[in-house]
Image (cartoon, coloured by chain):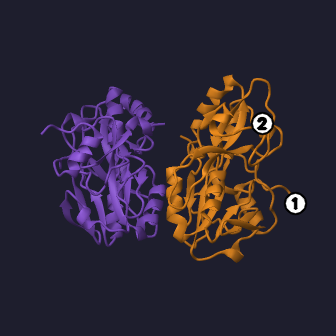
Chain colours: A orange, B purple
Amino acid sequence: MSIPTSPFEIRQRCRAGQFDAPTPGLAPGFVQANLVVLPYDLAFEFLVFCQRNPKPCPVLDITEVGDPQPKLIAPGADIRTDLPRYRIFRHGEFVEETTDIRPFWRSDLVGFLIGCSFSFENALLDAGLPVRHIEEGKNVPMYETNIDCIPTKRFSAPLVVSMRPLLPNQVVRAVEVTHRYHRTHGSPVHIGSPDAIGIRAIENVDYGDAVTFCEGEVPVFWACGVTTQTAIIRAKPEFAITHAPGHMFVSDLRDEDLTL
Amino acid sequence: MSIPTSPFEIRQRCRAGQFDAPTPGLAPGFVQANLVVLPYDLAFEFLVFCQRNPKPCPVLDITEVGDPQPKLIAPGADIRTDLPRYRIFRHGEFVEETTDIRPFWRSDLVGFLIGCSFSFENALLDAGLPVRHIEEGKNVPMYETNIDCIPTKRFSAPLVVSMRPLLPNQVVRAVEVTHRYHRTHGSPVHIGSPDAIGIRAIENVDYGDAVTFCEGEVPVFWACGVTTQTAIIRAKPEFAITHAPGHMFVSDLRDEDLTL
């Protein structure tokens, strides 16, 4: 069967159980989102956590309680079936991965769709800037930092960052380009000096894959949506669902719809 | 007694019952905010309404349930005492205006501080653009439009806009300048043609004061925080508190802290 190309087609194939692969590179130009599903009794506090930490946690859409439709970014979609893979958490522990969360669905669940840095990677490439993990066919390198997010009573996390190596004379352009994508992480949070943000060795990633540095390149760090997963695991909710890493929700929004 | 000049001094004088006047023009350069206080059982849905309508409802801070301190934008402040005047609503009806809401405070209340267009008016003036209601010593003209905000189950409202007349050759600069203030309403929502957004006669304001148009000027409309008050009144919560019009919360944030 051919690789699905439109957001609608991707979601339909997921729904039919015909597609369960990672989504990077699919439907270029369309916004892919992180999924977080929580019980209603945690929903307000989680949304406050996101409001306090908008760079790592840029909320794009929130479903009505018990309703799986993300009406703002993909009317007609169903978050229970339209992602390739999901992860189920009980009391903060990962318990299983699945391709369909309908058996787990409850009337008190709320879905949050959160922006992802895929949205600005095409813009970096269009600007002639390298995106090393794409060049090397790897997952983006990600690290926990020593920067604390602004907490709520139950949600707290270190800021998790993604990293892309660039030459010093490319850094300003990268800031200018990604600054426009303020609804999907936006501009970098740190440039160079990984030790200054608690990263001891750049080759020791916490998530994703290490990538190659070319001569003279410096690491540039952006806020990363894995921060939300870290906050959820720490809060130990009795029940939570997220997308499986790299298996995102593909929406009908265009990356350019979200720019400044 | 002298007019208070710093945000802290203003809040302290309000707290001491020594200041109950409007706040436009006070502590220039510091962010003034709308206040909405709602019971916890409506807080999540109200925050979702704001997330869906960020231009009229840009949330700057949210207090912990039952805690009157806005820790992000004015640590140490108390939203029950530190505004000059408040309005109390029961079942969506305005019942009284007061200078101290401590007698009404409950352990289930949540405070929302929401951005205000005062934050970009200095920038317009700095750019050499006129702000007519300031020139004429009036309140900004505001209108209900025929544009519906994206609703939630209980919160819905027409978009309310503020209006500032400008010459056609000033409009682009006004868009560029206010675009940067994306956390306090940002760029305009409409330019010219008031009838296209349901405003039949520009001299018939719904809130605030009508202002003079000079020869050749066109109306430029920005999203306005009065939208939140309209949504709250329509939702008829059993209890709600807002700031009294023009009597804002003066925070320790600088307008420039909130720009792009």
The quarter in which the N terminus of chain A is drawn is: bottom right
Residue ID at (41%, 33%): B177
Where does the image place residue B155, in percent across and percent down from the top left? 41, 65
Residue ID at (66%, 31%): A193
Residue A32 seen anywhere in this rendered image of the structure: no
Report which residue position mark 1 lands on.
Answer: A1
Where, by quadrant of the figure, is residue A80 drawn?
Answer: bottom right
The amino acid pointed to by label 2 is: Arg
Residue B163 seen anywhere in this rendered image of the structure: yes
The reply to whether the C-beta atoms of the residues labelled 2 and 1 are less than 8 Å apart is no
Give whichever of discs 2 and 1 has the lower sequence position: 1
Q: Name the element at disc 1.
A: loop
Q: Chain of mark 1?
A: A
The amino acid pointed to by label 1 is: Met
Report which residue position mark 2 lands on.
Answer: A132
Q: Label for residue B258? A: none
Residue ID at (52%, 50%): A150
Q: CA distance from mark 2 to mark 1?
A: 30 Å
From the viewer's side, name the closer residue of A127 and B29. B29
Relative side of A99 to A74, left or right: right
Where, by quadrant of the figure, is residue A209 drawn?
Answer: top right
